[in-house]
Amino acid sequence: QCEICGNVSYRGRHNFEKHFAEVKHSYGMKCLGIPNTKHFHGVTKIQDAQNLWKKFQLNVNKDIFDASKEEEYEDSHGNVLSRATYEDLARQGLL
């Protein structure tokens, strides 16, 4: 039984597996605001799908490059410094 498809029951393992690629399941996922990707194959409960989607979003946001924190600069002596440190030293005239 798949809650995402409106509590439709599927008879047999083959039909159950096949329904994840069908329009009805894709539409249900779209209504929830979740992409119907292979990561959600086998998920039939709405709450489980939403929890998994939140978990994926948190992991994706961790991997986004933040230039203000991760950008590095190299001074004339070859020292590698973070952006904030480099700008502080440059303002003080130490570079």
Image (spheres, rainbow, N blue to C red):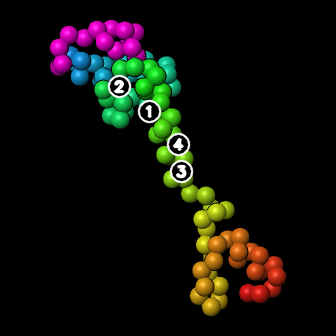
The residue wearing badge 1 is 52
Dot placed on the residue nearer the N-terminal end, 2 or 1: 2
Amino acid carrying label 3: it is Lys
Disc 3 and disc 1: Cα gap in Å?
Answer: 16 Å
Question: In the image, is residue 66 part of the stretch drawn in magenta?
Answer: no
- Residue beneath the point at 35% across and 25% down: 43
Dividing the picture into quadrants, the one containing residue 89 is bottom right
Above-or-below relation of 68 to 95: above
The residue wearing badge 3 is 62
Q: Which quadrant of the rendered structure holds the C terminus?
A: bottom right
Helix, strand or loop under label 1:
helix
The residue wearing badge 2 is 43
Helix, strand or loop under label 2:
loop
Residue 13 located left or right of residue 43: left
Residues rendered magenta in the picture: 1-14
The residue wearing badge 4 is 58
* Mark 1 Cα-neighbour bin, 10 Å: few <14, some 14–19, many ≥20: some
Disc 3 and disc 2: Cα gap in Å?
Answer: 24 Å
